[in-house]
């Protein structure tokens, strides 16, 4: 039995597709909903109005995230399919040129010309399109665009993230909404940043500091705007 089978490796890059959408969705859910709540609460409106604004922000944000992710990732998928169709035609029209093209790629990566040609021949004999998609176009199973997965993941995680500051509104006394929602949301963001960094194998303190900084800035700006307009009105 191969030693590789006895000692399989699990690389974190395989999580990139869903992890990016999940972290983006949850982070945006917390930041946008908490900022909306803090801004409305700072304008000295009623607790009922704050809660309604938060719920509206959750629903609108989840739909926006789902639609945005689906459209953007679908565009990526369309580009990948067009490139693959073009590559399939080129393989059909001039397979020898495509073999030389693949050989040059392997030479640039450090293989001797003779070995590079052998590798190109063997890979193309097995699956020419897959070989060119991976090594010429940079398209692989890991990086392939999945629009539906990205849309559903973003919408679901946005909703979960947005529900956190909303829950704080429900259990917080009316006069303390701004400080408690702000503080709790920053805590939620810190936990999210740590979880996302841990799942992706990144630096945990750096990721945590990054998300909390931008979250604090967003809430501070919306609270200031709410205070200004609340006073004017």
Image: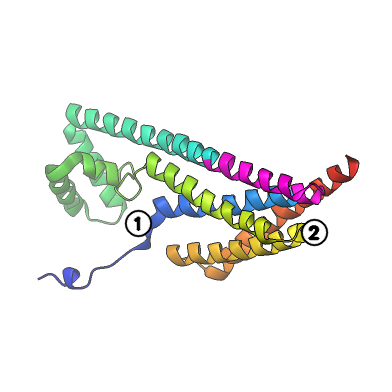
Horizontally, is 133 left or right of 77 in the view? left
Which one is earlier in the sequence, the residue at label 1 or at label 2? 1
Residue at 53% in and 43% down: 62
Residue at 23% in and 31% down: 88
**In this figure, which residue is indicated by the disc labeled 2?**
175
Dominant secondary structure of the magenta stretch?
A: helix
* Foreground label between 1 and 2: 2
Classify residue 173 by image quadrant.
bottom right
Quadrant into which the C terminus falls: top right
Horizontally, is 38 left or right of 115 in the view? right
Image location (x, y in percent) of residue 177: 74, 58
Residue at 38% in and 40% down: 148
Residue segment shown in magenta:
40-62
Image location (x, y in percent) of residue 143: 35, 48
Label 2: which secondary element: helix
Label 1: which secondary element: helix
Residue count near mark 2 (Cα–Cα under 10 Å), binned few <14, some 14–19, many ≥20: few
């Amino acid at each position: 039995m191969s030693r590789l089978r006895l000692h399989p490796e699990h690389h974190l890059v395989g999580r990139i597709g869903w992890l990016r959408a999940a972290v983006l969705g949850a982070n945006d859910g917390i930041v946008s909903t908490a900022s909306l709540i803090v801004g409305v609460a700072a304008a000295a409106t009623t607790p009922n109005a704050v809660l309604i604004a938060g719920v509206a922000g959750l629903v609108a944000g989840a739909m926006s995230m789902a639609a945005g992710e689906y459209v953007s990732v679908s565009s990526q998928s369309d580009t990948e399919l067009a490139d693959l169709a073009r590559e399939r035609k080129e393989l059909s029209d001039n397979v020898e040129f495509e073999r030389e093209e693949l050989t040059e790629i392997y030479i640039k990566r450090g293989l001797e010309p003779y070995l590079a040609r052998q590798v190109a021949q063997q890979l193309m004999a097995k699956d020419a399109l897959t070989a060119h998609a991976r090594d010429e176009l940079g398209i692989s199973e890991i990086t392939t665009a999945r629009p539906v997965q990205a849309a559903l993941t973003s919408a679901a995680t946005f909703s979960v993230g947005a529900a956190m500051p909303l829950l704080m509104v429900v259990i917080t006394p009316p006069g303390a909404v701004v400080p408690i929602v702000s503080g709790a949301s920053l805590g939620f963001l810190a936990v999210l940043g740590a979880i996302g960094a841990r799942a992706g194998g990144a630096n945990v303190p750096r990721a945590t500091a990054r998300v909390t900084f931008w979250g604090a800035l967003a809430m501070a700006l919306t609270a200031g705007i709410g205070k200004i307009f609340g006073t004017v009105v």
